[in-house]
Image (spheres, rainbow, N blue to C red):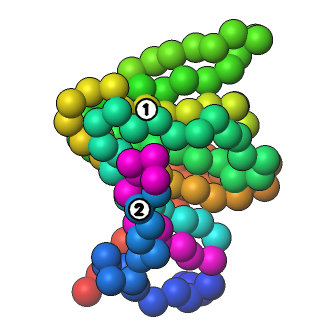
Amino acid sequence: GGRRHMRPISFSGMEDAITVQKPNGTHVSYHIFEESEIHLNRITPGSVQEWHYHTLIDECLLITKGVLTCRWLEDGAERTRKVREQEIVRVGSSVHTFANETEEDVEFVVFRFVPDGRDKRETIKNDKVVVDR
């Protein structure tokens, strides 16, 4: 079978990440790839990110520890939801901010990519080729 777009397996550890400690109490380790980015985010108790939005990227958060407070603007009103471990937030182009209103660190993984508007669900679900070894 024709295996197109051959990409070798690769690994990215903390030594490969771009790690930033921001004044707002956010600690981020960015793993940046050609068509996507994954970063590990830890925000300390009482931390609040600035309100912002993204024009091109799609950003999904997977909460791995603690409770994250998500705020966003919708229909002219500010909405709030607390998200917990194993929950996912898909930000879209909303104006949003995240905060840690707890006494414990909150940790989450952020997946970022630039969508092209095509629905790729069937490709994603079916793109697995089993090989005999």
Residue drawn 68% across the image and 20% down it: 73
Residue drawn 48% across the image and 27% down it: 70
Image spot of residue 67 (x, y percent) = 30, 29
Residue at the outermost front position: 23
Is residue 86 covered in magenta?
no
For disc 2, the marked residue is: 21
Q: Is mark 2 on a helix, strand or loop?
A: strand
Q: Which of the marked residues, 1 or 2, is nearer the chain's N terminus? A: 2
Boundaries of the magenta span: 23-34
57 vs 63, left or right, is: right
Disc 1 residue type (three-letter): Ala
111 vs 100, left or right, is: right
Residue at the outermost left position: 104
Q: Is mark 1 on a helix, strand or loop?
A: strand
Between 64 and 78, the one nearer to me in the picture: 78
70 vs 107, left or right, is: right
Between 72 and 104, the one nearer to me in the picture: 104
Classify the position of the C terminus by image quarter.
bottom left
Residue 95 in sight: yes
Residue drawn 54% across the image and 73% down it: 32
Disc 2 residue type (three-letter): Gln
- The correct choice, above or below, for 118 with respect to 104 in the image is below
Between 78 and 126, the one nearer to me in the picture: 78
Image spot of residue 82 (x, y percent) = 39, 21
For disc 1, the marked residue is: 99
